[in-house]
Image: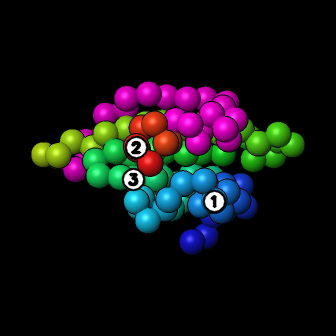
Amino acid sequence: MEKDITILKLIESLKLIINFSLLKVVDYWEADLCAIGLMKGNKLVYISTFNYAQNEDLMYDFDLETIDEDDKEEFNVVRVGRNVSEAELVSEIKLFLDV
């Protein structure tokens, strides 16, 4: 996977905290090197470091989304988080994806 170092480090960090065998890493944003998704069932967590990649203290943006069962192209945003810490991001991922 060709992604920005901020995303690669995040994934490695998350693997120490979250059981990735329960998740699927998705990359619907190949052109955006600072974005990645974590999916479980019809739930998707979009994560971006784009706005903070150059900052000393890395923060994250995320969208919690559900995918319409009848129309796989239809995503419904459930919650949005901006400028959050890794700890807050992890908490949101665990709660939303039930992992």
**Could you tell which of marks 1 and 3 lies nearer the N-terminus?**
1
Q: Nearer the viewer, mark 3 or mark 2?
A: 2
> As displayed, is residue 69 above or below residue 19?
above
Instruction: From the image, tell me which residue sits under label 1.
Output: 16
Is there a contact, CB below 8 Å, between mark 3 and mark 2?
no
**Mark 2: which amino acid?**
Asp
Instruction: From the image, tell me which residue sits under label 2.
Output: 98
Q: Residue 8: image x %, image y %?
A: 66, 62
Q: Tell me where the magenta segment starts and ends, as one range.
A: 72-92
Q: Magenta span has 80?
A: yes
Residue in view at x 42 percent, y 38 percent: 96
Q: In the picture, residue 50 is in which quadrant?
A: top right
The front one of 95 and 59 is 95
Quarter placement of the N terminus: bottom right
Instruction: State how far apart marks 3 and 2 are (Cα).
Output: 11 Å
The front one of 91 and 46 is 91
Instruction: From the image, tell me which residue sits under label 3.
Output: 39
The color scheme shown is rainbow
Q: In the picture, residue 18 is in which quadrant?
A: bottom right
Residue in view at x 82 percent, y 40 percent: 57
